[in-house]
Amino acid sequence: MKALPLLLCSVLLCGCQDREARAENAALQARVTELEAQVRAMQGEQATALPADAQNVTERAAGQNCANALTRTLEVFREDSLDDRYPSAAQTQLPAECVDFRVNWVARSERAYTFTVTDGSGRELARQSGGAPTAAPASGG
């Protein structure tokens, strides 16, 4: 007889726990559904933003490729020259990688150079420097 009230209490307790568990599960399911919707929205935004970013990355890489090719051209000329100098403007031929870009000389001498590579709109894509700036003559004493 004493077992009946105990059994009844455990059944009621289990019933309460089931209701709490169902409420928690429903709340978790609602949260998961909300997060899934946010992920789908973010993936949609990323898919529309990716092509513009990919175009930008591709253009910068092509500009850097031009800069690297021009640097190789300048360095090969210097290594092959008898007086270890870079080519003059008239002696410089832009590599094929630079056909679609503009090369702007920031500084240029027989011993050093700095240039930028820009796209058609003037946006800088790459910058390269080489050589050593001409040192001032040392004074003897």
Image: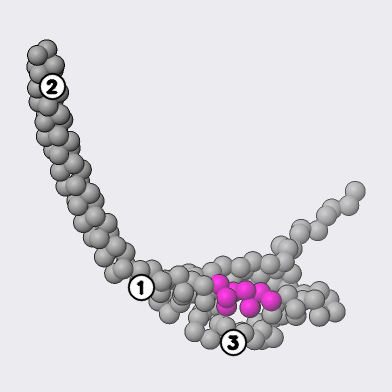
* In this rendering, the label closer to the viewer, 2 or 3: 2
Tell me the magenta residue range: 64-72
SS class, disc 3: helix
Q: Does residue 51 appear in this view?
A: yes
The residue wearing badge 2 is 7
What's the residue at 21%, 56% (across, down)?
37
Task: Name the element at disc 1.
Answer: helix
Q: Which residue corresponds to the image point at 19% horizontal and 51% vertical from the top-left?
A: 34
SS for callout 2: helix
Which residue is situated farthest in the top direction here? 2
Which amino acid, mark 1? Pro
Residue behind mark 1: 51
* Within-10-Å neighbours for mark 3: few <14, some 14–19, many 20+: few
Q: Is residue 82 left or right of residue 71?
A: right
Viewport quadrant of the N terminus: top left
Contact flag, marks 1 and 3 (Cβ < 8 Å): no
Kindly indicate whether the residue at mark 2 contacts the one at mark 1 (C-beta within 8 angstroms): no
Whether residue 6 is situated above or below residue 114 in the rendered picture? above
- Residues marked 2 and 3 touching at CB (< 8 Å): no
Per the picture, the main secondary structure of the magenta-coloured stretch is: helix
Going by the picture, which residue comes out furthest to the right?
141
